[in-house]
Image (cartoon, grey):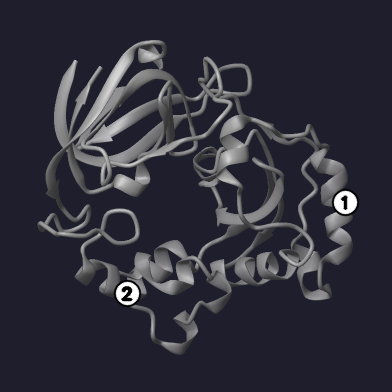
């Protein structure tokens, strides 16, 4: 198989805990199935051009996983409040795009616990949680609160980050070196740290979600590969997890290279 196109990252489909996630390499508007290529040699070659994943213009450098500088500075999805939702300024009338804010921020959000490299706290839009958990490489997750807006969810997440990490150790996550933990027990402990105004939004889910990834084997040493340093990334495809391809030669973070024009061989 040979395909050329604009790399946009990995997309996936979750089928339940008893089946591994189906992964696809997103090139242009095409999604290349990867699970069937496990154990096969693949290569990704940089063709020397980058294009913004939003407006399509050529750019010498990409920002925030695939945007040109104007889109990075102007689009609402690239505003600082996306990564710091507790600093949302929609109510101040300064949102970059009010319609974006109404669609993506002024809607119910979950605050959740996820086991990836360790138990972490995070947030995501309601109904987007499975995509978010897979993108983070979580093997287990559970929503613990439902808030009416992204800002409120961000305020609760920011508060709980005093007691739990809110970042994933990506090397540990890819190695699968994670201790099995009971999220229900941890959730009950976390509830003790809820500020009074957030207690009405607590959820009492009885079961967590388990996620299995298509991985033939893990690597003892995590070597990160970049198209900025090597024109062609190649090796035997051993698996996929989060936004990473696990190859016999190292790991390749696809979203970091969104906007690169590449040739895929597999």
| As drawn, 145 above or below 142 | below
What is the quadrant of residue 247 in the picture?
top left
What is the quadrant of residue 9 in the picture?
top left
Q: x, y (%) of residue 246?
A: 45, 27
Q: x, y (%) of residue 191?
A: 85, 59
Residue position for label 2: 97
Along the horizontal axis of the image, is 263 left or right of 253?
left
Q: In the depicted view, which residue is nearer to us: 121 or 256?
A: 256
- For the point 54% across and 43% down, the residue is 136
Q: x, y (%) of residue 159?
A: 73, 70
| Crowd rating for badge 2 (residues with CA inside 10 Å; few <14, some 14–19, many 20+) | some
Q: Earlier in the sequence, mark 2 or mark 1?
A: 2
Q: Secondary structure at mark 1?
A: helix
Q: x, y (%) of residue 29?
A: 20, 36
Q: Quadrant of the C terminus?
A: top left
Please tell me the numbered disc located at residue 46: none
- For the point 51% across and 28% down, the residue is 14
| As drawn, 235 above or below 148 | above
Residue position for label 1: 188
Q: CA distance from mark 2 to mark 1?
A: 38 Å
Q: In the depicted view, which residue is nearer to us: 197 or 189?
A: 189
């Amino acid at each position: 198989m040979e395909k050329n196109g604009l790399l946009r990252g990995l997309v996936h489909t979750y089928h339940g805990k008893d089946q591994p996630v189906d992964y696809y390499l997103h090139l242009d508007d095409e999604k290349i199935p990867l699970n069937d290529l496990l154990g096969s040699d693949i290569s990704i070659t940089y063709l020397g051009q980058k294009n913004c994943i939003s407006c399509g213009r050529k750019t010498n450098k990409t920002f925030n996983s695939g945007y040109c500088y104007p889109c990075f500075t102007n689009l609402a999805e690239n505003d600082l409040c996306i990564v710091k939702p507790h600093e949302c300024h929609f109510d101040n009338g300064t949102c970059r795009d009010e319609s974006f804010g109404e669609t993506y921020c002024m809607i119910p959000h979950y605050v959740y616990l996820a086991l990836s490299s360790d138990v972490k706290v995070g947030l995501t839009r309601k109904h987007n949680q499975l995509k978010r958990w897979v993108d983070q490489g979580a093997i287990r997750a559970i929503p613990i609160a439902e808030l009416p807006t992204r800002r409120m969810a961000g305020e609760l997440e920011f508060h709980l980050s005093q007691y739990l990490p809110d970042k994933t150790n990506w090397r540990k996550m890819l190695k699968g070196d994670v201790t099995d933990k009971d999220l229900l027990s941890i959730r009950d402990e976390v509830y003790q740290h809820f500020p009074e105004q957030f207690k009405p939004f607590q959820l009492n889910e009885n079961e967590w979600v388990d996620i299995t990834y298509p991985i033939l084997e893990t690597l003892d040493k995590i070597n990160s590969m970049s198209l900025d340093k090597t024109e062609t990334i190649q090796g035997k495809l051993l698996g996929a997890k989060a936004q990473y391809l696990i190859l016999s030669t190292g790991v390749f973070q696809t979203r970091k290279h969104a906007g690169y024009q590449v040739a895929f061989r597999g």
